[in-house]
Amino acid sequence: MADRRLQVFYTVAKQLSFTKAAELLFMTQPAVTFQVKQLEEHFNTRLFERSHSKISLTPAGELVLDYAERILDLTAEMETRMGEMTGQISGVLMVGASTTIAEYLLPRKLGEFKARYPQVQARLTVANSDTIESKVADHTLDVGLIEAPSHHPQLKSIVCCEDELVMICSPQHPLVKLSEITPAQLAEQPYISRESGSGTRNVVDDYFRQAHVSPDDLHVVMELGSLEAIKGAVEAGLGIAIVSRSTILKELKLGDLVAVSLNPPLVRPLSVVYAEAKFRSRLLQAFLDYAVARLKD
């Protein structure tokens, strides 16, 4: 129900790109530009500073963005509450998840949630934990599932389950003879790491620090942003890595990888996060309850 010009402006302002906004809104770029131009004519001022390579908000644009965010949030809240008067849980749920959770834990659970609430449309965004937190904080996403405890001041965090991490190596690696391995022993090996910003990377770095091993002292031979790429590099004998046991069940069964337990053990909480200031609809509450109850299974 909110003014379409305001919705388009808000999307452009958040993305700082007419092209990205057009993709998100399923509109052509000229149509997006036209809507923003109409809003600028309505206020008789420029809302964006434009250059060949980028755009930025003018002071007037910053003011309009502040009001647009509140107006659009109130509109969404009104529509949700009106819908809830029918007694049905329905609507669009924007879910974000870090890579490990999205690829290995969440698909089946989202399917079960959809079966329980067929009127719900769940849309999943996959990114590293830091990115998911940012998107939940700015209300781009309704809820996020991340691989590390959240310390974001605008977010509420609930631990939904625990996840064991292990060292993996190729079947030909000398370390396969070990039943467990210490951080000091790991530091002597060629190591394949997740990228900066990854929840797994943050947890593993903290694990080494607590064992008095600086992450800077690891013999990092690769830093990869894909868990599948890490598994492939380890299988090829390029190094060892630390990953969630739940992500390597197939490779362990096939004998492509070997897992060695860590000493001391590394068990991390997986958390669901949402914006504390955001209106908590029955749909969002239903998903939060479901995530806490079912992800641990």
Image (spheres, rainbow, N blue to C red):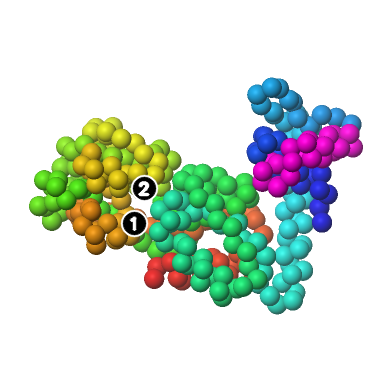
Question: In the image, what residue occupies the spot 85% across and 30% down?
Answer: 45
Amino acid carrying mark 2 in the image:
Leu
Question: In the image, what residue occupies the spot 32% across and 55% down?
Answer: 244
Amino acid carrying mark 1 in the image:
Thr
Q: Nearer the viewer, residue 132 or 236?
A: 236
Of helix, strand and loop, which one carries label 2? Answer: helix
Q: Nearer the viewer, residue 64 or 250?
A: 250
Residue 194's image quarter? top left
Asked if labels 2 and 1 touch by Cβ distance under 8 angstroms, the answer is yes
Residue denoted by label 1: 247
Where residue 39 sits: x, y (%)?
85, 38
Where residue 4 sits: x, y (%)?
81, 48
Left or right placement of residue 38 versus residue 194 in this view: right
Left or right placement of residue 182 versus residue 61 in this view: left
Residue 17's image quarter? top right
Left or right placement of residue 67 versus residue 158 in this view: right
Specify the quadrant that holds the N terminus.
bottom right
Question: In the image, what residue occupies the spot 24% across and 62% down?
Answer: 253
- Is residue 35 in sight in this rendering? yes
Residue 105's image quarter? bottom left
Of helix, strand and loop, which one carries label 1? Answer: helix
Assess whether residue 115 is covered by the magenta stretch.
Answer: no
Q: Is residue 95 above or below residue 217?
A: below
Question: Which comes sooner in the sequence, label 1 or label 2?
Answer: 2
Report the Cα–Cα distance between label 1 and label 2: 9 Å
Left or right placement of residue 289 versus residue 195 in this view: right
Dominant SS in magenta: helix
Where residue 241 sits: x, y (%)?
26, 45
Residue denoted by label 2: 227
- Is residue 43 in sight in this rendering? no
Region in magenta: 21-42
